[in-house]
Every structure is written in structure tokens, then in C-alpha cells.
Amino acid sequence: MLLVIHNISPPPGEFGGPWIDRLLTVNLPLDAHPYFADIAHLQMAAYCLIRRDGKIVQYVSFDQRAWHAEVSCYQGRENCNDFSIDIELEGTSGLPYTDAQYQALAAVTQLLLQHYTITPSRITGDSDIAPTRKSDPGHAFDWEQYQRLLAQTSFLFLGVVMTLFSLLLVLGWERLFELGEHWQLAYRLEPLFRRRRRFSLLHTLAMEITAMVIWSLKGVLFSVAQLTM
């Protein structure tokens, strides 16, 4: 899969209003601003939006197909909507994005890397899949800052692993397995939370990573426990 970073701002350069929601839910009043008549023909959707203050709004489940890329091509493969997920940043190509947006973007990206077949090498901008039509996220997007924050969230993952082994030493095998069942249930319920239109993935990042780690390590821990009995 592919992760595509876009920006969005109807009207351009105006932030914080209701117009992104109205556009992405096909409910944009054309008489509210002259610019809206120019984009009335657009039929688009988006998986999630990160606002200027870092708040995350989800519109489409990551397990569904969203029409965000229009006519597009990546490494010779056309119709990127068929194999990609997008993240929209509230902003314009020439205006710097906020630190809160980078932090939220790194958090969402880390979750997508864990849940889907996306790798850091398959993260790109809208301008790379539609270079003749698109310029976003633009020269104002700091790829180095984004990649640095993404690496930091990976270190958080390692920290969770170390914490689990510390709990193993303190609680023992049996109690850790009980916790594993609890977190596994939370992990399975996570898609239900995705259906909510507004939520903070930053708040659930630790739970998500912990659930994934316990789920993946449980079989290994059980095998080692059998050997030590």
C-alpha cells in the first residue's frame, strides 16, 4: 500500500472554518464564497484530516476505498485510489505547517505502518502521484521534521516492548497473559472507535502499540514458558 500526504484549504489560506467538513461530506454551499463555484465539480473523499491545532478528523474507514487521488500514478501503477491511504493537512503549499500537525501526522503514520502493508519508503506527496496537476504538500512541508518525529514514535514502540518485559519479570507469565487478553480485546474493538468522526489517535497510540505487541508476542511467551516449566 501507499500513504499519500495532501493539503487542503477551501478557500485557500483560510483555516478553522467548517468548509473542509462541508467539502468532504459533499455539502458545500456554493454561494458562501466565490471560490466554491470553482471547485463545485470536484468529487472527492479523504480518510482523515489533521487541522492546524493537531486535531484529527476521520471521514472514511482505512479499510475502505476513498476517492482522494483522482487521476494518479505511482511507479508506473495508475489509479492510486486502489492501493493508497491519504492524510489531509489543513494548509497550503506555501505556508509552513504547525508542530502540532507534524506530531499528529507522525502518530497516525506510525499506526498505519503497524496495521497496513505500508513502509516508510512508500510515503509520498500528492505532487508525486499527480505532478502535472498537484503541488501539495508543497515546499513548505518539512519532510526531515516529519521523518524525525516518525523515528521517535518508533522508539516509543521499543519502549513499550521493554516495559512489557519488565512487567513479565514483576507479574509473571500467567498475569501477563491475563493482561494480554484485556489488551487484545481493546485491539479488536479499535475499528469501532474508528467509525467516530472525531477522535485523537495521539491519545490511543500507546494502547494500540501495546495491544499489537502483546498480541504478537503472546505465542512466543507461551512457548518460552513451556520450556521453563
Image: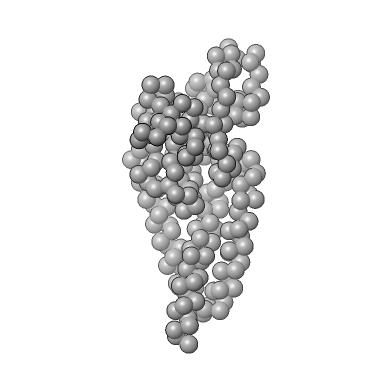
In this picture, is 94 found above or below 161? above
- The picture places residue 149, in percent across and down from the top left corner, at 39, 47
- The image quadrant of residue 188 is bottom right
Residue at image position (35%, 35%) is 75
Residue 2 appearing in the image: yes
Residue drawn 58% across the image and 13% down it: 37
User: On screen, 194 above or below 88?
Assistant: below
At x 62%, y 62%, the residue is: 185
- Name the quadrant containing residue 162: bottom left
Is residue 90 visible in the rendered image? The answer is: no
Q: Among all residues in the image, which is located at the extreme front?
A: 77
The x, y position of residue 107, in whole percent, is: 47, 47
Q: Position of residue 28 (x, y in %)?
A: 64, 22
Residue most extreme to the left = 144
Which of 74 and 30 lies nearest the eye of the viewer? 74
Q: Residue at x 54, y 31 (%)?
A: 67
Q: Is residue 134 left or right of residue 19?
A: left
x and y percent of residue 217 in the render? 47, 68
Count of residue discs: 0
Rendered view: 36 above or below 174: above
Q: Residue furthest bottom?
A: 229
Q: Quadrant of the N terminus?
A: top left
According to the image, what is the colour scheme of the structure? one colour
